Image (cartoon, rainbow, N blue to C red):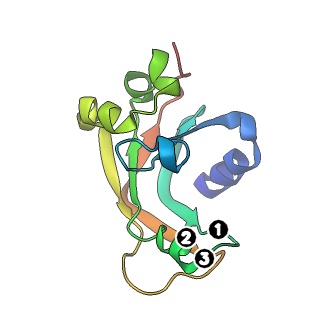
Amino acid sequence: SASREARDIESRESSYRFFHSGGESEADGGFHWFAVQLNETVLIRSVTVKVREVGSSTDFLRAKGIEIFTSNRVQAIFSGDHCRSKGMSRQYEDSEAYWTKCGQTDKKGSITAGESLKVDCPAPAAEEKQPCGR
């Protein structure tokens, strides 16, 4: 089942690659981004963003309004030097046609430590198995 597949992927770190924009001083144009490249084909029905367990209320507010995008064309997006690029904004602009907006986390209300914010995707999106850098 799809939910079993999702649990399997969550439990195997070797089933994905994680990229991020770096620390505050290294952020891409003032924006922080995170990308997860799956090494297997799966249907994405939702994405859950988990808020930090510790920190200030300002840290927790960063979980508001996070935009979630999916793509089934990762080879076109994450290839060559892009795997280590801190310029994800530019990569997104250059490959915008390959991305589909799943949704975004709620912008209203308070956020608590450790809270999970679920974003449901409007239609399942298949992520293709395409290793980075090839």
Three-letter code, disc 3: Ser
* Residue at the spot 43% in from the left edge and 29% down from the top edge: 74
Three-letter code, disc 1: Arg
The mark lying in front, picked from 3 and 1, is: 3
The image's mark for residue 52 is 1
Q: Which residue is mark 3?
A: 56
Q: Are marks 2 and 3 in contact (CB under 8 Å)?
A: yes
Name the one closer to the observer, 55 or 124: 55
The image's mark for residue 126 is none
* Above or below, 31 relative to 132: below
- Residue 105 in the figure: left or right of residue 129: left
- Residue 116 in the figure: left or right of residue 63: right
Q: Residues within 10 Å of mark 1 (few under 14, many from 20)?
A: some
Locate residue 5, reporting x and y percent. 65, 48
N-terminal label among 2 and 1:
1
Q: Are marks 2 and 1 in contact (CB under 8 Å)?
A: yes
Name the one closer to the observer, 92 or 75: 92
Locate residue 59, reporting x and y percent. 55, 70
Query: Disc 3 on helix, strand or loop?
Result: loop
Three-letter code, disc 2: Asp
Locate residue 41, reporting x and y percent. 54, 36
Q: Residues within 10 Å of mark 2 (few under 14, many from 20)?
A: few
Q: Point out the residue furthest to the front here.
A: 25
The mark lying in front, picked from 2 and 1, is: 2
